[in-house]
Image (tube, rainbow, N blue to C red):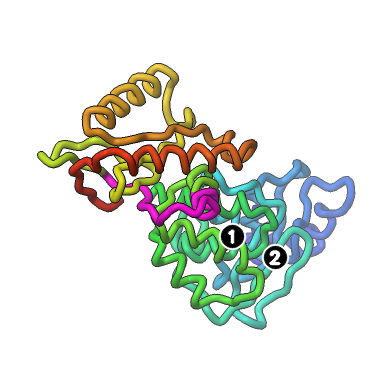
Amino acid sequence: MVSTAWLRELGVPGRTITRRCEPGGTWQKLLPRAILLSRAVPTEDQRIAAALIYAGENAIVTGLSALRRYGLRQAPAPNRVHLLAPRGAVTSRDFVVIEATTRLPRSRIRMDVPVAPIPRALIDAARRLSNPRAVQAMMAEAIQRRDCTVAALAQELADGPKVGSSLARKALIPLLDGVHSVAEADAWELWQRSGLPACQWNVKIFDEHGNFIAKPDAWCRKVGFAWEIDSRDHHSEDDDFANTVARNARYAAAGIVVLQTLPAWIRSEPDKVIAQLRAAYEAAERRPCPNTRTQGS
């Protein structure tokens, strides 16, 4: 992928560039000033390079294209290249979305491409998505990987435009409570519906002697009740089973009531899970409360 200016610097006449980009030629013009030196279907990297040539030197990549360069697995594949550019630069066309802004952030270089910081890229992407679970998944992954903080996302939402930000604002609420994943966000919403007292999310629990017990998804210290959303996403079957048995043994030794729930149950049988939550919480209330302390996530 090269610019027409670069070709002219090499001495390639303008008429040659035009002829080679015509049907049957060996090159193709993806965008104004952006030439692909083949007739192959352009890759995502080539489309991004073309978009940056078209938009000019001050443009930077944001949204889904930027998030994929940061390595976020939950970022959906983009069908257009999303750029930030100074006002009055160029306009959107073909496969390029130009977002004119007076808040042009300092770029980071990822895979030789200037990209927006993760908080900005996340919120820019979220404003153009319609799937709330996709938005929740992206934001939760970035927090879990420690690519950015919840505070940074909140600040970006406060500084940026309000239009189109409703999904990101909704996704931020459970993250502010300490939730780390989409499954936990589903659990968080279910807990709000249950009518049970507020709980803590992803805090480490220790016994009275300072020995580590577990880090439950939800924890009610007042009654000694832990809720675990057990998924196999991050473990092999053998490791998952062994770790779960060891964890539950520590819960039992400490006198803690624990409820285990599969993520699929939360989505498919929410009322049943709520009934189980209430029953487990009431069972914990009837028992002596264990002596524990917590450490934040």
Magenta stretch: residue 105 in it? Answer: no
Q: Is residue 48 visible?
A: yes
Q: Which residue is mark 1?
A: 63
User: Which secondary structure, mark 1?
Assistant: helix
Above or below, 224 relative to 264: below
Amino acid found under the numbered disc labelled 1 = Gly
Looking at this view, is 84 or 201 the one in front?
A: 201
Residue at horizontal 22 percent and vertical 28 percent from the top: 253
In terms of sequence position, does the residue under pointer 2 or pointer 1 come before the other? 1
- Of badges 2 and 1, nearer the viewer stands 1
Amino acid found under the numbered disc labelled 2 = Val
The Cα–Cα distance between marks 2 and 1, rounded to whole angstroms, is 10 Å
Where residue 159 appears, as percent x and y from the top left, is 50, 77
Q: Decide if residue 145 is on the left or right side of residue 102.
A: left
- Mark 2 surroundings: few (<14), some (14-19) or many (≥20) residues within 10 A: some
Q: Decide if residue 110 is on the left or right side of residue 50.
A: left
Where residue 291 appears, as percent x and y from the top left, is 18, 43
Residue at horizontal 10 percent and vertical 39 percent from the top: 209
Looking at this view, is 284 or 179 the one in front?
A: 284
Q: Which residue is mark 2?
A: 97
Residue at horizontal 25 percent and vertical 33 percent from the top: 255
- Mark 1 surroundings: few (<14), some (14-19) or many (≥20) residues within 10 A: many
Where residue 53 appears, as percent x and y from the top left, is 64, 64
Q: Quadrant of residue 32?
A: bottom right
Contact (Cβ within 8 Å) of mark 2 with mark 1: yes
